[in-house]
Image (spheres, rainbow, N blue to C red):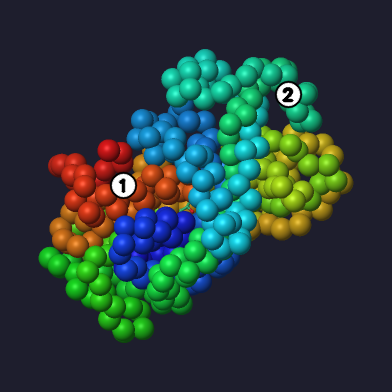
């Protein structure tokens, strides 16, 4: 039983199905729909950490295999469900300022193609001259489409989806046989996996797992410019993502506002100004949509991929913060390998972040 039907829960379910298990996903809202702040629908879909050289080795280990995985999985989903996740290798243009030497060293170490380029050749307005970097291999998916395709695949593969069903916070126990819903029903399973994103801390806080996870809101604007960018662009914490059908995302923010999943005019203005600084022609374009999502925020962007420290048949796959879409495949493989006893739990900490 998987608690939470975001990208991490769905990817974990897929991995377990592929290993021959019967799987139920319990989701308090509806899987693959935009509801109440879940992160996966709201994400930008860049399959790459924004400035990967700033992160530790485990973050790189979890994110590096993602592009190849999504390329193959998107094709499989299209074949088997008829739904296109809009996977695209649109490349990433990094505009200054950032640590160019660290970036080049990182690209060399991980054999990532990189070119020093003149940003004027990429239809963007650069503030600081010509010292941009072009990473042509960076890919994207379109999260709402990807989630719809995952949902259909899981349905076709007999995964039970208990939607509009919320599990109540868990009390400490040695062995978990059933977990009560907020409506009072008791749901039984042999093994349980918490993939509840920003809500994971509250769900487990009465148990020995003291997760260091809190919601971190991100807001995004949507445009449909007359002439779109050809590539994704990053500058100083802000990015723009062109979709294949002409839409353009501009985001995002990192806001510590608890479980408030609203949108604000102040952020709308802030993002609009940053977007127009890169693409002045957006000044004449309407903002078509504005949304937010609550990321499962964790220190140093390190998720918990682990057995529960005391409850025998409970596992945790949560806290992927800014890169849950990118980390979900490797993370799902790790947690299912741990559940199958194929890899050991690293002691004394209950958390493994890479094997
Ligand atoms: C604006 C924004 C941009 C982003 N851009 C990117 C990006 O470009 N690339 C990238 O890799 N990542 C990106 N992310 C991060 C990524 O979206 C998240 O890390 C990822 O979606 C987390 O997935 P999740 O499945 O853990 O959480 P969620 O998607 O939040 O799913 C958790 C689910 O658990 C359910 N749930 C919670 N409690 C219960 C309960 N008690 N009972 C039943 N169900 C419950 C919730 O309803 C929810 O559906 C972005 C996030 C945001 C907000």
Left of 64 or right of it: where is 97? right
Question: How many numbered marks appear?
Answer: 2
- Choose mark 1 or mark 2, whichever is in front: 1
Indicate which disc, 1 or 2, sits on the residue closer to the N terminus. Answer: 2
Mark 1 and mark 2 in contact? Answer it, CB < 8 Å.
Answer: no
Residue at the disc numbered 2:
119
- Residue at x-position 70% and y-position 47%: 243
| Foreground of the two, 58 or 259 | 58
Residue 278, quarter of the rendered image = top right
| Foreground of the two, 355 or 19 | 19
Residue 81 in the image, given as x and y percentages of width and height: 56, 63
Q: Is residue 256 visible?
A: no
Residue 167 in the image, given as x and y percentages of width and height: 34, 73
Instruction: Please tell me the numbered disc located at residue 17.
Output: none
Image quarter in which the N terminus is found:
bottom left
Residue 250, quarter of the rendered image = top right
Q: Is mark 1 within 8 Å of ligand 1?
A: no
Residue found at the very far left of the displayed protein? 174
Instruction: Please tell me the numbered disc located at residue 334.
Output: 1
Left of 152 or right of it: where is 58? left
Is 199 drawn above or below residue 95 in the view shown? below
- Residue at x-position 78% and y-position 42%: 228
Q: Is residue 152 visible?
A: yes
């Amino acid at each position: 039983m998987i608690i939470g039907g975001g990208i991490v829960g769905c990817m974990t379910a897929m991995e377990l199905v592929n290993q021959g298990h019967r799987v139920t996903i319990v989701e308090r809202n509806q899987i693959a729909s935009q509801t109440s702040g879940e992160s996966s629908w709201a994400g930008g879909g860049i399959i790459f950490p924004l400035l990967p050289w700033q992160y530790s080795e485990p973050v790189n280990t979890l994110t590096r295999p993602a592009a190849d995985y999504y390329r193959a999985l998107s094709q499989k989903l299209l074949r088997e469900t008829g739904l296109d996740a809009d996977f695209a290798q649109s490349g990433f243009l990094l505009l200054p300022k950032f640590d160019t030497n660290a970036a080049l060293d990182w690209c060399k170490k991980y054999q990532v193609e990189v070119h020093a380029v003149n940003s004027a050749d990429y239809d963007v307005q650069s503030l600081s001259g010509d010292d941009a970097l072009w990473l042509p291999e960076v890919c994207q998916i379109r999260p709402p489409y990807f989630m719809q395709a995952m949902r259909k695949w899981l349905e076709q593969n007999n995964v039970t989806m208990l939607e509009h069903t919320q599990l109540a916070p868990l009390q400490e126990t040695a062995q978990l046989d059933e977990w009560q819903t907020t409506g009072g029903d008791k749901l039984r399973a042999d093994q349980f996996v918490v993939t509840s994103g920003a809500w994971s801390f509250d769900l487990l806080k009465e148990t020995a797992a003291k997760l260091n996870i809190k919601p971190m809101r991100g807001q995004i604007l949507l445009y449909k410019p007359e002439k779109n960018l050809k590539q994704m662009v990053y500058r100083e914490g802000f990015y723009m993502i062109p979709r294949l059908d002409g839409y353009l995302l501009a985001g995002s923010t990192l806001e510590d506002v608890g479980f408030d999943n609203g949108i604000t005019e102040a952020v709308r203005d802030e993002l609009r100004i940053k977007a127009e600084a890169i693409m002045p022609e957006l000044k004449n374009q309407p903002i078509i949509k504005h949304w937010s999502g609550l990321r499962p925020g964790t220190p140093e962007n390190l998720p918990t991929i682990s057995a529960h420290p005391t409850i025998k048949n409970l596992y945790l796959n949560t806290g992927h913060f800014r890169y849950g879409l990118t980390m979900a495949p490797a993370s799902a493989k790790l947690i299912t390998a741990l559940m199958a006893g194929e890899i050991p739990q690293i002691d004394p900490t209950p958390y493994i972040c890479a094997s």
